[in-house]
Amino acid sequence: MKKKGYDDLIWYRTRMSRLLRQFSSPASESKKQLVETSDPVVDVWERGDEIIIECELPGVREKEVKLYVDEGYLIIEGQKTESQDAACLRYLRLERQYGFFRRVIELPASVFTADVKATLIDGLLSIKFTKVAERRKVKVRIPVTS
């Protein structure tokens, strides 16, 4: 069983690696390689017998998102693609991040994966799980709809 302090240490290490990569590679080079973006922000809460997770993914389409449940963890991963403007010769400011993202969230309770619902509407990914008594150990892919 993993301890909370260990998970926090892994999160900080991953975050620092991402920050160092962002500062060491110019924006123009990021188009040529798969660059990991910052973590999407997530809210997790319980309502009755449901676990609800909402994740902000502005500019991401449902076909660019993959969701998995694996041994009590929800894995959100995908790709933020940059709009291709052929008239743009050079950027004057580039603050939005594009590329691969991945977020791993420990589910606060055991969930029933057969009836999970995930929707992506206006850049907000909503995932609703029903709680169950026992923890599942199977990796499951979750379809995303709009």
Image (spheres, rainbow, N blue to C red):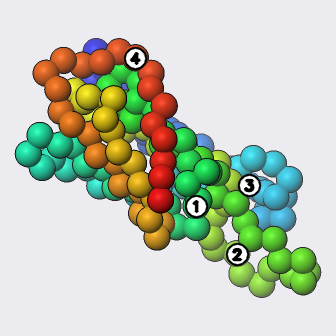
| Mark 3 or mark 1, earlier in chain | 3
In whole angstroms, how far apart are the C-alphas of marks 4 and 2? Answer: 41 Å
On screen, residue 69 versus residue 86, left or right, reads left
Residue 92 on image: x %, y % = 77, 84
Three-letter amino acid code at the position of disc 1: Val
Extreme residue toward the left, this view: 48
User: Would you identify the image quadrant in which residue 85 lies?
Assistant: bottom right
Tell me the tag on residue 138.
4
Q: Are marks 4 and 2 in contact (CB under 8 Å)?
A: no
Q: Which residue is mark 3?
A: 24
Horizontal side, residue 89 vs residue 24: left or right:
right
Note whether 40 is above or below 6 in the view shown: below
Position of residue 135 measured from the top left corner of the image (x, y, whole percent)? 24, 19
Q: CA distance from mark 1 to mark 2?
A: 18 Å
Viewer-nearest residue: 93 or 136: 136
> Which of the two marks, 1 or 2, is nearer to us in this view?
1
- The residue labelled by disc 2 is 94
